[in-house]
């Protein structure tokens, strides 16, 4: 089958790879009709992880069940399904508690598994014509038949639940004011989710004009950090108090204000200053224990200079970690079905799989309006 294969920093290619097959009675094979490029994929694409050449990318996958293992009971050939980026067993201690992003079964020696991602287990990515789904009864979420709302539903694999998860981590409640740092796909989904949850005012911080425009279009207040300290800009619009809650949708490759260099802890420290005393921070933005391209030796080891003293002084609470997609995807799916949510506003480009190499390059450079790319390996 054809698949997006990592060749080395800033290079992917479409290659023929081995077709997936049923390996366990609870597996299914899915013919992939939509698969999105994630900002997290760019960390590998840029060589900022330990990913080795040969890995097939793709953890945001939607398609049609093509074959089922003999142990599968709730799925049939022809079912349209979307899979969480988390590969999870459904029965371990963490899965039973709802922490499916930290499954203890699927990736021995590590809490959590995912498709097509470094250190997340042996699961081939879905930027390909087919993908194998283990523990399929648990991991597949059924969708309405047909092709309607395809670009909405594919976002249930990761960024819509992840944006929502940022709000859960920050305990966003009706009436809250919220600051979201980062207007990439996850940041826009976090802002959108805050509004769905009843936030009274949402600020979105970024420097890319197209992204800030998207934030404004959904009713958020855009904050361009090249125009001044973002925390001070937000305080000026909140009576000097700051926001009730804050969400980091950037992670460790954050840019220093006014300079063309990275400052890995700047978003965390900015949020500490942005959120009012006794508020809360949600941190779904990715941080890693090893960053080969880190700007200094400490950053390369995942050790950042965070203002813990101010965090403590202000009595701030914080929650971190990747999204437990299964906790949210069913009710977010139903909101899409009932036209209560339309997350596909973030999708800027829909392309055939063969254009993946160009799409990665343009998405990575933030050019030509590339905010979110959905690839279509096969016809729906």
Image (tube, rainbow, N blue to C red):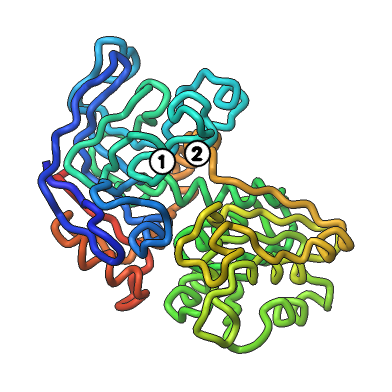
In the rendered image, residue 135, in percent from the top left (x then y), is placed at: 38, 22
| Helix, strand or loop for disc 2 | helix
Judge by depth and name the residue closer to the eye, 33 or 150.
33
Question: Image check: 281 left or right of 344?
Answer: right
Report the residue marked by disc 2: 325
Q: Is residue 302 above or below residue 219?
A: above
* First of labels 2, 1 by sequence position: 1
- Rendered view: 233 above or below 37: below
**Number of numbered tags placed on the structure image:** 2
Point out which mark residue 85 bears: 1
Q: Residue furthest front?
A: 297
Residue at x 14%, y 34% (from the top left corner): 19
The picture places residue 79, in percent across and down from the top left corner, at 26, 27
**297 and 45: which one is in front?**
297
Q: Residue at x 50, y 39 (%)?
A: 325
Q: Quadrant of the C terminus?
A: top left
Q: In what element is the residue under mark 1? A: loop
Q: Check if mark 2's residue and mark 1's residue have beta carbons within 8 Å.
A: yes
Looking at the image, which residue sits at the far right? 313
9 w.r.t. 97: above or below:
below
Image location of residue 173, percent across then percent down: 72, 50
């Amino acid at each position: 089958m054809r698949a997006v294969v990592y060749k080395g920093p800033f290079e992917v290619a479409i290659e023929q790879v081995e077709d997936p097959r049923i390996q366990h009675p609870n597996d299914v094979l899915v013919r992939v009709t939509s698969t999105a490029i994630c900002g997290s994929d760019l960390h590998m694409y840029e060589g900022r992880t330990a990913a080795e050449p040969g890995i097939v990318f793709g953890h945001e996958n939607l398609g049609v069940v093509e074959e089922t293992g003999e142990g599968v009971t709730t799925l049939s050939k022809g079912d349209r399904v979307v899979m969480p980026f988390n590969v999870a067993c459904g029965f371990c201690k963490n899965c039973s508690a709802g922490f499916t992003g930290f499954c203890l079964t699927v990736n021995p020696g590590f809490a959590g598994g995912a498709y097509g991602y470094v250190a997340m287990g042996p699961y081939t990515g879905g930027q390909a014509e087919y993908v194998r789904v283990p523990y399929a009864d648990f991991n597949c979420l059924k969708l309405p038949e047909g092709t309607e709302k395809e670009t909405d539903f594919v976002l249930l694999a990761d960024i819509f639940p992840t944006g929502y998860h940022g709000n859960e981590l920050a305990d966003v409640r009706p009436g809250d004011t919220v600051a979201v740092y980062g207007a990439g796909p996850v940041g826009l989904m976090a802002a959108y989710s805050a509004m769905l949850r009843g936030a009274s005012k949402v600020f979105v911080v970024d420097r890319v004009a197209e992204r800030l425009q998207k934030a404004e279009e959904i009713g958020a207040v855009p904050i361009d950090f090249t125009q001044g300290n973002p925390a001070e800009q937000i305080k000026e619009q909140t009576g000097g108090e700051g926001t009730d809650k804050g969400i980091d949708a950037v992670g460790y490759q954050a840019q220093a204000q006014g300079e063309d260099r990275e400052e890995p802890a700047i978003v965390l420290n900015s949020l500490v200053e942005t959120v009012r005393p006794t508020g809360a921070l949600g941190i779904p933005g990715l941080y890693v224990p090893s960053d080969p391209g880190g700007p200094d030796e400490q950053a390369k080891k995942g050790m950042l200079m965070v203002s813990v003293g101010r965090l403590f002084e202000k009595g701030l609470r914080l929650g971190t970690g990747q999204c437990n997609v299964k906790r949210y995807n069913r009710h977010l799916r139903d909101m899409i079905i009932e036209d209560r949510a339309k997350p596909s506003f973030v999708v800027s480009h829909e392309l055939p799989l063969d254009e993946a190499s160009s799409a990665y390059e343009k998405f990575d450079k933030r050019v030509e309006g590339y905010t979110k790319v959905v690839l279509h390996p096969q016809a729906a």
